[in-house]
Image (spheres, rainbow, N blue to C red):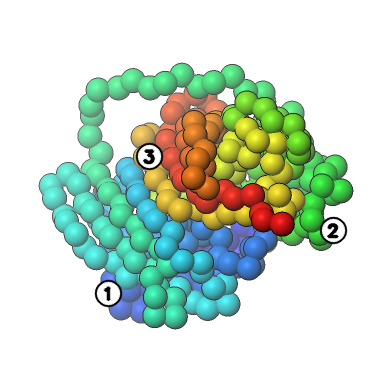
Amino acid sequence: MSAALDSLLDLLDLEQIERDIFRGTSRSALVPRVFGGQVAAQALVAAGRTVPADRSAHSLHSYFLRMGDPGAPIVYSVDRIRDGRSFTTRRVVAVQHGQPIFHLSASFQTYEEGLEHQAPMPPAPDPETLPTAEQLLPRYADRFSEPEVVDRLIEARAAVDLRYVDAPPFGSVGEPREPRSQVWFRTNGKLADDPLLHVCMATYVSDMTLLDSVLLAHGRGGWAVGDVVGASLDHAMWFHRPFRADEWLLYDQESPSASGGRGLGQARIHTQDGRLAITVIQEGVVRVPRD
């Protein structure tokens, strides 16, 4: 296991301070606020720790309310909304400096047999043939607003091996193209056999690139380039089938709409053998900076 992955696992290992109250810390991000995927993953950890072990997360719906302060702890308060025969529902509020910064509702279900079908996996190259972050990012060093951005991007993604199928937004600035993006990802090291951990890790990664397709439609490079500003507004995920976050997952993303200073991204995550594991939808603020 890499040191970066070990650090990320420590980040997700929340401290329990009361029966349904947990405390987490933050790690440095590319922007001076808490990374949204971190807050969503930690909130799901908090919810999952109040749920019987035989119930797995099948969906989450969340809202980002305020920017998080990376220098202050985050307190996660869990409400036990419902414990039914098949489903369990939890609500989590993340608080900093006395104010809510994030709200999540998550649902868990006992395993059962049922009807089965899925959308087919789209074509994609073998992830092992694609460049790693360390190989890819230095090629675009001249595109970023600050010279140290490359090192910061590599550091931010050190726990996860994330590989772009096509050029990322910062690789095609000024060239609008189809609003679709694909990345392969897996953790840089093996994880324990805990389904909640794999779901939380996928939740963490899902916030890294989902709005890329919005940027591609307009030839924008993104936050690191400085030609847009923005933040996540909401985030929803449905976990359809078991998967491992330490094995290759294809994140197939697209944007059906951008308007009113907001952009919508939707995606499907498939396992390497073609099983549809997760559906993701996110809307975010996407604004062109004013002169």
Q: Amino acid at mark 3?
A: Phe
Element marked by disc 1:
loop
Q: Residue at x 51, y 69 (%)?
A: 68
Which quadrant of the view contains residue 272? Answer: top right
N-terminal of the two: label 2 or label 3?
2
Q: CA distance from mark 2 to mark 1?
A: 46 Å
Element marked by disc 2:
loop
Q: Which mark is residue 19?
A: 1
Compared with 41, 217 (above or below) is above
Q: Nearest to the eye among marks 2 and 3: give it.
A: 2
N-terminal of the two: label 2 or label 1?
1
Residue with the most extreme left position = 85
Compared with 3, 235 (above or below) is above
Which quadrant of the view contains residue 31? Answer: bottom right
Q: Residue at x 35, y 57 (%)?
A: 104
Which quadrant of the view contains residue 21? Answer: bottom left
The answer to whether residue 211 is left or right of residue 99 is right
Q: Which mark is residue 147?
A: 2
Q: CA distance from mark 2 to mark 3?
A: 38 Å
* Mark 2 Cα shell of 10 Å, populated few (<14), some (14-19), many (≥20): few
Q: CA distance from mark 1 to mark 3?
A: 27 Å
Q: Which residue is at the front of the view, 191 or 109?
A: 109
Element marked by disc 3:
strand
N-terminal of the two: label 1 or label 3?
1
Q: Is residue 128 visible?
A: no
* Mark 3 Cα shell of 10 Å, populated few (<14), some (14-19), many (≥20): many
Q: Residue at x 65, y 42 (%)?
A: 162
